[in-house]
Amino acid sequence: VTANANILGGYLAICCVPLLVAGALRTQARLGRLSYWLLVAAACLLIFLTRSRAATLALGMSIAFLSLYDPRIGRSIKIFIVGVVALLTALFVIQSSTKYLD
């Protein structure tokens, strides 16, 4: 366990989430996929609870990269996913920053 929430959020965003999503996309068993997606949801929740802006940006980048990398997803859906992820990431980063509070 780390004393700094930014380190925990960065580790989850860079190391855990992409590997869990890749495992969920490659697993054939229904229970295995469900387990992976539940772990992804838990990791994303923990990232948001750390309120780490860098981890949120890394999470958004990894989701965008994984959606662009998957050949099963159509081009228009990839553009939509990247746009939504970019918008949600920007909104969360701005909301979690204390710089813009007035």
Image: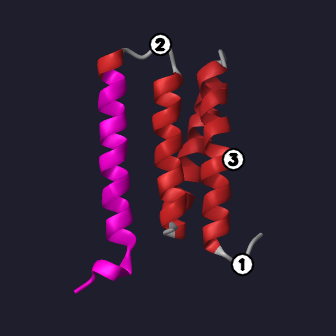
Q: Which numbered dot is residue 52?
A: none
First of labels 1, 3 by sequence position: 1
Q: How far apart, in angstroms, are the residues tagged by discs 1 and 3?
A: 18 Å
* SS at circle 3: helix
Q: Which residue is mark 1?
A: 3
Q: Which numbered dot is residue 72?
A: 2
First of labels 3, 2 by sequence position: 3
Q: Is residue 60 left or right of residue 86?
A: right
Main SS, magenta region, reads: helix
Give the class, few, some or many, for how many residues have Cα within 10 Å of label 1's Cα (few <14, many ≥20).
few
Q: Is residue 60 left or right of residue 23?
A: left
Rendered residue at 29%/20% (across/down): 76
Rendered residue at 33%/67% (across/down): 94
Q: Is the residue 22 above or below the residue 16 in the image?
A: above
Asked if the magenta segment contains residue 94, the reply would be: yes
Query: For the view shown, which residue lies furthest in the bottom direction?
Result: 102
Q: How far apart, in angstroms, are the residues tagged by discs 1 and 2?
A: 40 Å
Q: Is the residue 18 above or below the residue 11 in the image?
A: above
Q: Quadrant of the C terminus?
A: bottom left
Query: In this picture, which residue range is highlighted in magenta?
Result: 77-102
Rendered residue at 69%/47% (across/down): 15
Q: Amino acid at mark 1?
A: Ala
Q: Amino acid at mark 3?
A: Cys
Q: Position of residue 67 (x, y in %)?
A: 47, 28
Q: Is residue 59 left or right of residue 83?
A: right
Q: Which numbered dot is residue 15?
A: 3
Q: How far apart, in angstroms, are the residues tagged by discs 3 and 2?
A: 23 Å
Asked if the magenta segment contains residue 48, the reply would be: no
